[in-house]
């Protein structure tokens, strides 16, 4: 391997997380738009599907857009700083959103963006007790 090969490889490895995160977000949007689980959604739940791990932050969004972090209501714009302040730091984010009658609450896009900015794994759950992974947002 030449010096040029190593520097190109190093550059690629530094840039890898951004396209991966964008692809995962695009796949999540696609799955939620289609409304039916796809092979990607089924793989996202993976073999570790189960309850939210003990070291994870639990984020719940009500049908009206209220946000709860580990059972405590927090303003949507303070969610990321509140997660960063958790001790010990969370290893994962478990996310649940109640279905809204008129579509997604307006705050959901901002909430999801703030969660993605934390660069932690995000698991989607089908129930507010975080026991059943859904594989879909």
Image: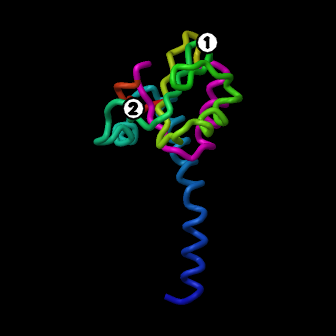
Residue 47 picture quarter: top left
Residue 105 vs 14, above or below: the answer is above
Q: Which residue is drawn at 32% across and 41% down?
A: 46
Residue 86 in percent (x, y) is at 57, 36
Q: Is residue 71 magenta?
A: no
Between 77 and 4, which is closer to the camera in this rendering? 77
Q: Residue at x 39, y 37 (%)?
A: 41
Q: Which-is-in-front pick, marks 1 and 2?
A: 2
- Crowding at label 2, few (<14), some or many (≥20) Cα neighbours within 10 Å? many
Q: Give the range drawn in magenta.
A: 104-129
Left or right: 14, with 50 as reference point: right
Mark 1 residue element? loop
Residue 8 in percent (x, y) is at 59, 77
Q: How is the image coloured?
A: rainbow
- The residue that mark 1 highlights is 64
- The residue that mark 2 highlights is 52
Left or right: 121, with 66 as reference point: left
Q: Does the magenta stretch include residue 128?
A: yes
Q: Residue furthest front?
A: 87
Q: Marks 1/2: CA distance?
A: 23 Å
Left or right: 29, with 133 as reference point: right
Between 120 and 38, which is closer to the camera in this rendering? 120
Residue 85 in percent (x, y) is at 62, 37
Residue 89 in percent (x, y) is at 53, 42
Mark 2 residue element? loop
């Amino acid at each position: 391997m030449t010096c040029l090969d190593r520097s190109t490889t190093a550059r690629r490895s530094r840039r890898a997380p951004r396209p991966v995160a964008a692809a995962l977000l695009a796949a999540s949007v696609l799955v939620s738009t289609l409304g039916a689980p796809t092979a990607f959604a089924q793989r996202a739940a993976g073999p570790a599907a189960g309850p939210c791990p003990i070291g994870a932050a639990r984020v719940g969004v009500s049908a009206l857009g209220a946000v709860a972090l580990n059972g405590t209501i927090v303003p949507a714009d303070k969610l990321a700083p509140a997660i960063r302040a958790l001790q010990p730091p969370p290893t994962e984010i478990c996310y649940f959103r109640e279905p809204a009658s008129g579509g997604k609450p307006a705050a959901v896009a901002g909430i999801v963006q703030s969660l993605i900015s934390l660069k932690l794994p995000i698991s989607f759950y089908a129930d507010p007790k975080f026991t059943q992974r859904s594989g879909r947002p």
